[in-house]
Each structure stands twice: as C-alpha cells, then as structure tokens.
Amino acid sequence: MIVRTLSEIAGTERDVNWGNGQSRRFLLEADGLGFAFTETLILAGTDIFIQYKNHLEACYCIEGAGEIKDEGGNTHRISPGTLYALDKNDPHYLRAWTDMRLISVFNPPIKGDEKHNLAGDETSSY
C-alpha cells in the first residue's frame, strides 16, 4: 500500500516547479501502478501551449478558473468540478485566470523528472 500526503511531497524531488506553478507528483512510474497521479498548481496569468506527445492525461479542476483552447479554436471554461481529457495527445493552450489546482492522471505514467519548457516543447519524456 502506498500512502502519501501533500506535506510529505512538498519540497522534495516530487515537488517540481515547471515555470508557471508546481507539480506535486504523488504517483510515478517507479511506483508500479501503470499510471501517474499529480496535483498541479497553475499560477494566475499563465497562458501556455502544452502537448504531451508520449502521455494521455485527464485533469480535474478542484480550485480556480481558466480555460483550455484546442487546435480547432474551441474554448472550454475550466472551473471546480470540470474534467478534461487529452485522449489524442491533444495540443492545447491552458490559460489560468486565477490560481488553479488540477488533479491529473497520466498514462503511461511519467517518470517524475519531466518538465515543460515555456515554448510548449517537451523535455525528458513528457
């Protein structure tokens, strides 16, 4: 059984500053569950292009407000209680109007050292 708390993760190698917030990585590839589980803080004013070329992701908003815009120009409001899933490695823009907290699941799982660069490219295997 794996039990982790946010306070245990804060300030460790599982608490990754990605430039526009923090990614708290509760479950990673090394945990052996076949998926990764994170809590991500996105800072207000963030406007970033993201595409995960090697992972599918589902995000559930638990705090804050913003929007995502897909490649086709469709915009979707994100607020507490909203889930969005990037089921086709969808390139998208993420905009945070306020600080937002998202709970995310990745498949296959991330290793833990992945980061975005702010141009939207991936580093490591993200």
Image (cartoon, rainbow, N blue to C red):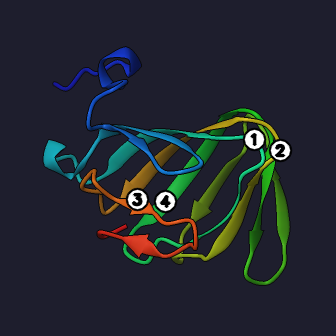
Q: Decide if residue 44 is on the left or right side of residue 59.
A: right
Q: Decide if residue 26 is on the left or right side of residue 29.
A: right
Q: Which amino acid does label 4 sit on?
A: Glu
- Camera-side residue of 60 and 44: 44
- Separation of disc 1 and disc 3 at Cα? 19 Å
**Which residue is located at x 16 percent, y 24 percent?**
1
Element at badge 2? loop
Instruction: Report which residue position mark 3 lands on.
Output: 115
- Separation of disc 4 and disc 1 at Cα? 21 Å
Specify which label sits upstream in the sequence, 2 or 3: 2
**Which residue is located at x 30 percent, y 37 percent?**
14
Decide: marks 2, 1 in contact (CB < 8 A)?
yes
- Separation of disc 3 and disc 4 at Cα? 15 Å
Q: Nearer the viewer, mark 4 or mark 2?
A: 2
Q: Which amino acid does label 1 sit on?
A: Ala
Instruction: Report which residue position mark 4 lands on.
Output: 57
Decide: marks 2, 3 in contact (CB < 8 A)?
no
Element at badge 3? strand
- Camera-side residue of 38 and 35: 38
Q: Which amino acid does label 3 sit on?
A: Lys
Q: Decide if residue 66 is on the left or right side of residue 118.
A: right
Element at badge 1? loop
Specify which label sits upstream in the sequence, 4 or 1: 1
- Separation of disc 2 and disc 3 at Cα? 22 Å
- Camera-side residue of 126 and 120: 120
Instruction: Report which residue position mark 1 lands on.
Output: 44
- Separation of disc 4 and disc 2 at Cα? 21 Å
Specify which label sits upstream in the sequence, 1 or 3: 1
Count of labels shown? 4
The answer to which quarter of the image holds residue 3 is: top left
Element at badge 4? strand
